[in-house]
Image: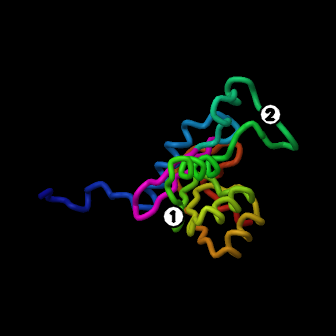
Amino acid sequence: MPENLSARRQRPTWDEYFLDIAFSVAERSTCDRAHVGAVLVRDRRILATGYNGSPAGLPHCDEVGHLMVEGHCVRTLHAEQNAIIQSALHGISSEGATAYVTHQPCLTCAKMLINAGIQRVVYAGNYLDTYSRQFLAEAKVQLDFLARPRSADSLYRPNSDGIQ
C-alpha cells in the first residue's frame, strides 16, 4: 500500500467522468462554430452518444461551409438530437436516463430530451436560452451545471453557468 495515500490521484465523480466523455465525443463535431457532445447514461452505463454534425451522407460544415439562417448554422443536427436518434435507431430506451452535454441544451433539444424521457441534464457550458431552462423545469427535468476545465468556442464559456 502506498505510504502517502493523500498524494494519490483523485478519481473523478461519475458526473465528471461522463461529462468528460461528452467533451471527447464533441471532438467528432464537424461544425467549427461549436463542438458539442452529448452522452445518454442510465445506471452508470452509456446508452448512446451524439455530436453536432450533418445528417448521415450529407456534406459537413468543415467540407462545404456553414448554412447560415438568422445567425444559426442549420446544416447540422445538435448533439442531443443525434444521441436521441442513435438510441432510437438501435432500439435502446432513454427513459429515465441522464444526458451529459458540453453545452446547455437549446429549446428544441430540451423539448426532445423531455419527450425522450430524460430525467436529468448535466451540462458544462452556457447557451443562454431561458426558455430551455423553463421547459426543463416545468417538465421536472433536473438541470445541473458542472464546470469543467475546457477551452472555449463560439458558445461554450467554461467559467459561467449562463445565469446572468
How busy is the neighbourhood of tag 2: few (under 14 within 10 Å), some, or many (20 plus)? Answer: few
The dot on residue 107 is none
- Kindly identify which residue carries mark 2: 67
Is residue 155 rendered to the left or right of residue 95?
right
Q: How is the image coloured?
A: rainbow
Q: Is residue 121 left or right of residue 73?
A: left
Mark found first going from the N terminus, 2 or 1: 2
Please name the amino acid that badge 1 sits on: Ala
Res. 99 image quadrant: bottom right
Measured from the top left, where is residue 115 in percent x and y?
Answer: 65, 64
The alpha-carbon separation of the residues under discs 2 and 1 comes to 32 Å
The residue closer to the viewer here, 163 or 112, is: 112
Reading the image, the residue beneath label 1 is: 97
- Is 62 included in the stretch rendered in magenta? no
State the residue in front, 149 or 42: 42
Please give the range of residues in magenta.
35-50
